[in-house]
Amino acid sequence: MNIHEYQGKQLLKAYGAPVADGVPIFTAEEAEAAAKKLPGPLYVVKSQIHAGGRGKGKFKELGPDAKGGVRLAKSVEEVVAHAKEMLGNTLVTKQTGPAGKQVNRLYIEDGADIDRELYLSLLVDRTVGRVAFVVSTEGGMDIEAVAEATPEKIITVAIDPETGVTDADVAKINGALKLSGEAAEDGKKLFPLLYKAFSDKDMSLLEINPLIVMTNGRLRVLDAKVSFDGNALFRHDDVKELRDITEEDSKEIEASKWDLAYVALDGNIGCMVNGAGLAMATMDIIKLYGAEPANFCDVGGGAGKEKVAAAFKIITADPRVEGILVNIFGGIMKCDVIAEGVVAAVKEVGLKVPLVVRLEGTNVELGKKIINESGLNVISADDLDDAAQKIVKAVKGN
């Protein structure tokens, strides 16, 4: 689960992180009062969407010469003008895709005098099975671009969970970021508390880009991108309250109600499978035969008829779906249960696109019998290769 920048900063501030004063707003009418709560004379007006690259983004409605989704203002009046122009419009960045995201919230923040911009993140480093700091002196840039052009400038420091962040770890991070004086002293406080926040709240990512050294020599968290492990949210009611469903795909929201692993993609062939590995193999072979998957939908190993029916409805609700491939290997999941779920869903919502079903495993013959006797216009397949070829052919109409 993702949260907005201002929410992440409020969370980190509660742990003691150095964060600028700021006020979130939801309407342009709130902008003047929000700005007057801040010291000034420099303000930053930030679009709050779940995507990076906001500063370089463009608003669809404002033309190519308009300013981006993060703007400086030197007066309260300028803050108000920016708020009126940004709220309600669609911001397009590299991470949103061409559709962009509507800006429904802004964060008005006190400005900062920046000397240097640094990159810092915490994530789970699966290669060593530990939480790790990933840091670089190249802050304010896409870390992917830094990794490609100058990988030597990215340093990883894995943290021993038994000791937490030690003085030696702090020294490594300070050295990697070339911090000294008051900034290094700030690092001694900041790095352990970031690790504590990450661990306490079951985060999957904490990215600060940039972490800045100000002209007064002190550190400040200038941005905060925070994601949480969805499997641990049951422990954090306070985190669940931060969820903004307007930033999420409606189909993914519905899928979460059924505990379905569903991710919307950009293709035109819907996929229903059981198991992440089988899902990836199914998507790969669809691409091999010249088409693109419209989703990743894993119903899991123990789904019942109702869950399968819900998954099918979610897939068919996507207007981009021009064909559906059901690819099930019955182990714990029984093929007859899948068949019953598909039949029930089709009878309820109808079937307007080609449907290819490939079943294998437990109760496969019974599953095929249920499909064949349902009266549905279903294309059966013998194996995955056959299924992929058939659905791509059906969609392309050749």
Image (cartoon, helix red, strand yellow):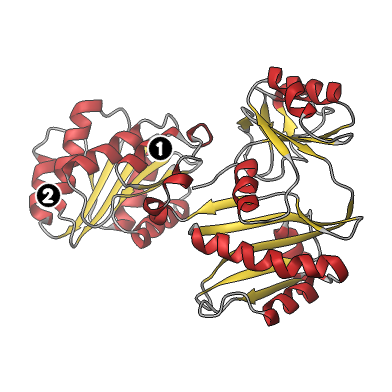
Instruction: Determine whether the residue tagged by mark 2 lies in a helix, strand or loop.
Output: helix
- Check the image and report above or below for 291 versus 107: below
Mark with earlier residue (2, 1): 1
Residue 102 in view here: yes
- Residue 310: image quadrant is top left
| Callout 1 crowding tier (Cα within 10 Å): few <14, some 14–19, many ≥20 | some
- What SS does tag 1 mark? helix
Q: CA distance from mark 2 to mark 1?
A: 27 Å
Query: Does residue 136 appear anywhere in the picture?
Result: no
> Above or below — where is 106 with respect to 262?
above
Residue type of the residue flagged with mark 1: Ile
Residue receiving disc 2: 336
Q: Nearer the viewer, mark 2 or mark 1?
A: 1
The residue carrying pointer 2 sits among few (fewer than 14), some (14 to 19) or many (20 or more) residues within 10 Å by Cα, namely: many
**Residue 342 vertical placement versus 368 (above, below):** above
Which residue type does callout 2 highlight?
Asp
Instruction: List the residue tagged with mark 1.
Output: 253
| Location of residue 294 in the rendering, given as x and y in whole percent from the top left corner | 44, 42
Residue at x 14% of width, y 48% of height: 337
Q: x, y percentage for residue 386?
A: 30, 54
In the rendered image, which quarter contains the C terminus?
top left
